[in-house]
């Protein structure tokens, strides 16, 4: 358990103890001190616990384990361990080009002002589809993958700016940056999760540290 | 005075029990790593806590509005 989670659990338990005291002896609220205690126990601490809980859940929802906890995502999780550098997500995951504990979120959130919020709202739709609807098979993106999400990290990097494939035609870089030439749907980086090919794939086994 | 106190006490007790239930839901969902946990926390835990807080605030308002029987 991380430090923040420990603090949150401590706040919740402390709140429960305070509230339980009031539930067992509500007559103490007749005194001035009791009224103040009730205000803290029944309003301040629950609001604090709830706010911290929302924050904790949102942070947790960014983790790779969280995304892969749904059965439909299993193959996408496996695709991160394919031993083939042409698989874009696998390379990013295995070579630490994205944080491994937030691999899904790093590439599948919009790097816009409300990107996090829209990602979470989409997540709620996914939970609805998971339990009450039928998730599409194979899973599809809502819209073509925007280069902005790649450029969030790659823009300005030497490997991106000076790559022979990117500089051979002087128009290529500017078209990529303007999202007119897709990184992923052109023939350059078009092997993404490709879960249909996993049966033939070999997988990378992480060495024990 | 006694009737008034009893009513407030009942509301505080009810608010407290709802809040404890909401906080327990929060505690359980924190240990569960699945999107459903987030929904349970928001829909069940959040509703219980919101209701508990609302009943507590209502007890304050009703106590203010009613004249003291003393």
Image (cartoon, helix red, strand yellow):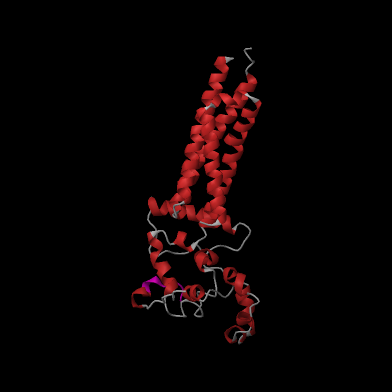
Q: Position of residue B57 (x, y in %)?
A: 59, 30
Magenta residues, as a range? A191-196
Q: Nearer the viewer, residue A104 or A133?
A: A104
Residue A12 in the image: above or below residue A102: above
Residue farthest toward the left in the current orientation of the protein: A199
Q: Position of residue A56 (x, y in %)?
A: 54, 52
Q: Position of residue A42 (x, y in %)?
A: 57, 34
When asked about the image quadrant of residue A49, the answer is: top right
Inspect this view and state whether residue B36 appears: yes
Location of the N terminus of chain B by quadrant is top right
When asked about the image quadrant of residue A146, the answer is: bottom right
Q: Nearer the viewer, residue A8 or A103?
A: A8
Location of the C terminus of chain B by quadrant is top right
Residue A14 in the image: above or below residue A81: above
- Which residue corresponds to the image point at 49% horizontal and 76% vertical from the top-left? A91
Residue A94 in the image: above or below residue A38: below
A84 displayed left or right of A168: left
Q: Give the overall secondary structure of the magenta segment.
A: loop
- Which residue corresponds to the image point at 42% horizontal and 79% vertical from the top-left? A83
């Amino acid at each position: 358990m991380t430090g923040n989670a420990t603090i949150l659990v401590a706040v919740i338990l402390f709140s429960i103890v305070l509230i339980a005291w009031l539930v067992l002896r509500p007559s103490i609220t007749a005194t001035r001190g009791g009224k103040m205690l009730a205000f803290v126990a029944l309003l301040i601490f629950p609001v604090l616990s709830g706010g911290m809980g929302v924050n904790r859940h949102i942070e947790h929802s960014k983790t790779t384990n969280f995304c892969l906890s749904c059965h439909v995502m299993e193959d996408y999780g496996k695709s991160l361990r394919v031993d083939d550098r042409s698989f874009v997500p696998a390379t990013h995951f295995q070579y630490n080009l994205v944080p491994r504990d937030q691999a899904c979120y790093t590439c599948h959130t919009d790097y816009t002002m409300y990107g996090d919020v829209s990602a979470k709202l989409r997540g709620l739709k996914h939970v609805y589809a998971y339990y009450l609807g039928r998730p599409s098979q194979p899973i599809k993106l809502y819209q073509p993958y925007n280069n902005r999400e790649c450029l969030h990290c790659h823009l300005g990097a030497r490997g991106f700016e000076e790559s022979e494939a990117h500089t051979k035609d002087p128009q290529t870089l500017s078209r990529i940056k303007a999202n007119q030439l897709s990184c992923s749907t052109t023939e350059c980086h078009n092997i993404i999760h490709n879960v249909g090919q996993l049966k033939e794939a070999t997988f990378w086994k992480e060495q024990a540290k | 005075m006694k009737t008034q106190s009893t009513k407030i006490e009942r509301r505080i007790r009810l608010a407290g029990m709802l809040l404890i239930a909401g906080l327990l839901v929060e505690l359980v969902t924190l240990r569960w790593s699945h999107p459903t946990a987030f929904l349970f926390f928001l829909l069940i835990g959040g509703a219980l806590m919101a209701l508990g807080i609302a009943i507590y605030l209502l007890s304050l308002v009703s106590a203010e509005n009613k004249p003291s029987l003393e």
